[in-house]
């Protein structure tokens, strides 16, 4: 558990809950936390966390080029079978 200095929160004009949400979203975007763990860090439900992501136009799923390449290879193999 991390203790947050009230003076710093006041200076940043942010509540503890808002700061936890910001950290959770950042770690989620960096692929360092799953959606469930990020929601837990933010102390909100997964559905609420998904809503916060949607409000910021942050995708729930990250589809990388490597994923596309793997999917295309799989489809090609399936067509050949």
Image (cartoon, rainbow, N blue to C red):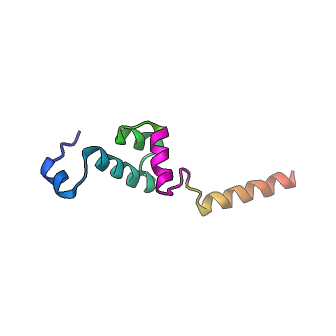
Residue at (30, 44) in percent of width and height: 17
Which is more toward the observer, 20 or 56? 56
Residue range highlighted in magenta: 47-61
Q: Residue furthest left?
A: 7
Residue at (29, 50) in percent of width and height: 19
Residue at (35, 47) in percent of width and height: 21
Q: Is residue 53 left or right of 14 when viewed as pictured?
A: right
Q: Is residue 42 left or right of 74 when viewed as pictured?
A: left
Q: Residue furthest bottom?
A: 65
Residue 11 point in image, percent of width and height: 16, 57
Residue 54 point in image, percent of width and height: 51, 51
Q: Is residue 72 left or right of 78 when viewed as pictured?
A: left
Position above or below: 45 against 60? above
Q: Is residue 14 left or right of 6 when viewed as pictured?
A: right
Residue 57 counted in the magenta span: yes
Position above or below: 18 against 72? above
Residue 4 point in image, percent of width and height: 18, 46
Residue 80 point in image, percent of width and height: 86, 55
Considering the whole magenta stretch, tell me its main secondary structure: helix
Residue at (22, 55) in percent of width and height: 13
Residue 48 counted in the magenta span: yes
Task: Name the quarter where the N terminus is drawn.
Answer: top left
Please state the total of marks drawn on the protein image: 0
Which is more toward the observer, 70 or 59? 59
């Amino acid at each position: 558990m991390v203790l947050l200095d009230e003076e710093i929160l006041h200076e940043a004009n942010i509540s503890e809950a808002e700061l936890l949400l910001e950290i959770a979203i950042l770690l989620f975007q960096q692929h360092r936390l799953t959606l469930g763990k990020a929601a837990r860090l933010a102390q909100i439900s997964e559905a609420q966390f998904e809503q916060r992501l949607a409000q910021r136009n942050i995708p729930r799923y990250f589809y990388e080029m490597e994923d596309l390449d793997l999917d295309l290879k799989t489809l090609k193999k399936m067509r050949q079978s």
